Amino acid sequence: MTPVRKAVILAAGLGTRMLPATKAVPKELLPIVDKPLIQYAVEECIEAGIDHIVIVLGPGKEAIAEHFAERTRADAYAREKGDAGLIARVSGPARLARFDYAMQEEALGIAHAVACAREFVEGEPFALLFPDDIIVGARSCVAQLADAFATTGGTTIAVQRVPRADIPQYGIVVPDGEGNPVRLRGVVEKPSIEEAPSDLGIVGRYILSDTIFTHIDRTPPGKNGERQITDAFASQLAAGEGVFGLAYEGTRHDTGRPLGYLVANVAVALAREDLAGPLRDRLRPLIAPEAP
């Protein structure tokens, strides 16, 4: 089995749910405490042994590439200061992995965005990440998926049980029996609550098998001319290929919405020894103010 050594991170979206903060700043560069969202996704890949990362950008997202570049103004400033700790923090992102970039000029769906990275990853399995999702746990979610892929050999999707009211916001999988990972019989994109075949929703982490581009090519554009990755999964299933769901271990924060973004910041800060105590002290009077 070919090991997973590459990842594609999708960073082409407009971040409309976080406007006006994302009007000029890519949403993937919004900070969670003191690191941008996208760096958490990159570090999750590194923990899984992935050393080549392709980031799919949209127009106006060039600042993301600068974050993972060397010889920026911030690098020059750190060197001038001669502060070893500052130099390590500023230059660290560029040294995490080998980075390549692809451009999605038009918002034509997730499968189309993946296809923009084709030249870098075709012919081998690769991880796919949406950096809106931060997953915190003892072990990288991508590493868990890569381990599962080593046993399944087929596209493996991270899933979690979602509240019934939230089902229409998710792609929902149709499990074929029990197990973890479990073989899937189908994938339904954002069904109604009444029509949902399960409560297992797809999270923004995948290992895609080396056949995925064949099935993206077979996937016709749908609503608004967009190509959806769930349709490519359905094509894999129709061809008799195995597609699997993995209920990962960890806590997911959806930072694409203001509330989830705020909760993620608090959760990450509370996990840090240098911030947990002072943050609790500051939050306590805000949450339970003393009576006058």
Image (cartoon, grey):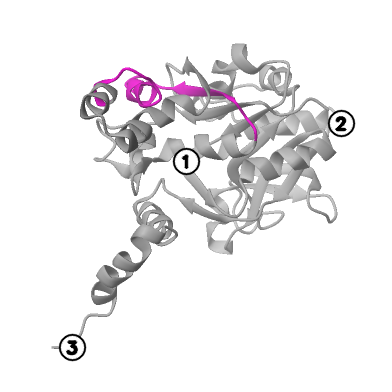
Tag 2 secondary structure: loop
Report the amino acid beneath label 2: Gly
Q: At x 83% / y 38%, what residue is drawn? A: 152
- Indicate whether residue 172 is drawn in magenta: no
Residue 150 placement, left or right of 28? right
Instruction: Please name which of the two marks, 2 or 1, marks the residue nearer to the observer.
Output: 1
Quarter of the image with the N terminus is top right
Distance in Å between CA atoms under marks 2 and 1: 35 Å
In this view of the protein, can residue 238 be seen by the observer?
Answer: yes
Report the amino acid beneath label 3: Ala
**Badge 2 vs badge 1, beta-carbon distance below 8 Å:** no
Distance in Å between CA atoms under marks 2 and 3: 65 Å
**Reading the chain from its start, which is encountered first: label 3 or label 1?**
1
In the picture of the structure, the residue carrying the numbered disc 1 is 40
Q: Residues within 10 Å of mark 2 (few under 14, many from 20)?
A: few
Residue 240: x and y in percent read: 86, 31
In the picture of the structure, the residue carrying the numbered disc 2 is 240
Between 292 and 97, the residue placed more toward the observer is 97
Residue 212 placement, left or right of 254? right
In the picture of the structure, the residue carrying the numbered disc 3 is 291
Report the amino acid beneath label 1: Tyr
Between 135 and 106, the residue placed more toward the observer is 135
Quarter of the image with the C terminus is bottom left
Tag 3 secondary structure: loop
Which segment did they paint magenta?
49-74
Residue 62: x and y in percent read: 34, 20
**Reading the chain from its start, which is encountered first: label 2 or label 3?**
2
